[in-house]
Image (tube, rainbow, N blue to C red):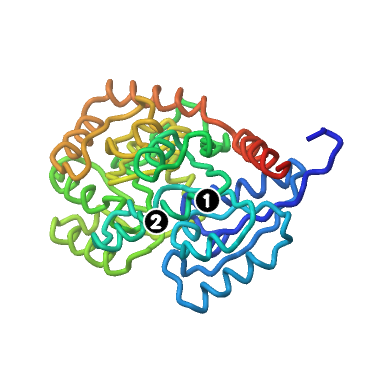
Amino acid sequence: MSAHQPHPEIAFALPGDIHARSGGTQYDRRVIETLRALGQPVRHLALPASWPAPDTTDTAATLAQLRGLPQDMPVIIDGLAFGAMQTRDVAALDRRVIVMLHHPLGLETGLAEARAAELITREAANLRHAAHVIVPSGHIKTILGQQFGVEGTRVTVAPPGFDRTAPALPRPRKDDPPLILTVGLICERKGHDVVLRALGKIAELDWCSVIVGAVQDAALLSRLKGVRDDLGLRHRVHFPGEMSPQALSDYYSRAHVFALATRYEGYGMVLSEAQLHGLPIVTCATGAVPETLRGAGLLVQPDDVDAFAQALRRLLTDAATHDILSRESQMAGATLPHWRDTAHIFQQVIGNHAAQ
C-alpha cells in the first residue's frame, strides 16, 4: 500500500466491556487505540459479554453485527468469541477474518474434560476458516501448529506493548513489612490457592500480601478467603478486587516481590508489568511464562506449593538474590516493545489481507 493511500477501515470485534482490565481486553483496547493514532480507521464491534458461552439471543446478535459489516471490510475477531462460535456460522460469514487469539479456550484451567475437548475440536475447525491468526507469543504459535493444525505461515506473533511509566531503580522499598504482590483474575487458572498455601509455609517471616484482580468466580473467592483464614492469614493477605491503573501502579511501586502461581499463560502481561517496575518475580514454568520472563525471575512447577514457598523465602531473606533479580527484571523490562510496535505488526497483517 502506498504511503499516500488511505488505510482501509477495519472492524475489531471483542466481547464485553472494552475497558475491562483483563489482560486480553486491555491488549485489544490498546491495539485499537494505537491503530487509530497511526491513522488506521477501526470500527469497534462490542459483542455480547456472554462469550464464550452465549445463549441463542447473544449468538444471533453477534452474527447480525458481523453480517452487517461491508463485505470488503476486514474484521478482526477476538478468540474469546471466534473459538466458541459454531463452525457452520464461521463458515457462513464468507469474509476475510483475522483472529486475535490470546490462548486457546479449551486450555483454560478447571474446564470439565468433555467441555475442554469440545472447545478444542471446535476451535481447530473454526481456525481453518481464518484468513490469518495473530497471537501474543511464540508459545501460542507453536501450540496452534502442534495441537490445532494451523500452518505457521498463517500465524503472526504480536507481543503486547507496554508504557514506560515506572520509576527507574534504585527506588525505596516503602512497605514495612515487605509487600508480596499478586495480580490476576480470580479464577482457577491463576493459582491464587497455591500462593496462599505457600504463604502459610512462611508465616514466621515478616511480610504482607495483596492479591489484586477482578472476580470471575465468586465461589472461588469465597474458598480462597476460607483457605486464608484457616491458615491464620486473615490480617496479612488482602483481596482488594479490581483496581484502577493508577492504584495498581502504586502497588507495583511499593511491592518487594511479585508472585503469580499461574497454571497457564498465553503471554502473562502482569509479569512484564512487574519487570517494568524492577520487581523480582516468583512464578511457574508453564505456557508462555518462560518466554515472557526471559530468565528474569524464579520459576517453579505449577501446583508445587513447597517450591513456591521456598522461592518466596529466598527473596525475603536473601538480599543479594533479591537485588540481582531486581536488576535483571529491570533490564528485561527496558527491552519490552511499545504499543506502536504491536500496532505496526497488526497493520502489516491487515495490509496483506486488505489487498487480497
Residue in view at x 62 percent, y 33 percent: 341
Q: Which residue is mark 2?
A: 213
Relative vertical location of residue 66 with respect to residue 286 in this rendering, above or below = below
Kindly state the secondary structure of the residue where label 1 is placed: helix
The kind of residue on which mark 2 rests is Gly
- Give coordinates of residue 250: x percent, y percent: 47, 45
Dot 1 crowding, Cα within 10 Å, few <14, some 14–19, many 20+: few
Q: Which residue is mark 1?
A: 245
- Give coordinates of residue 333: x percent, y percent: 48, 29
Q: How many marks?
A: 2
Residue in view at x 67 percent, y 48 percent: 33
Residue in view at x 54 percent, y 60 percent: 91
- Residue 163 as seen in the image, left or right of residue 42: left
> Image quarter for residue 322?
top left
> Image quarter for residue 228?
bottom left
The kind of residue on which mark 1 rests is Pro
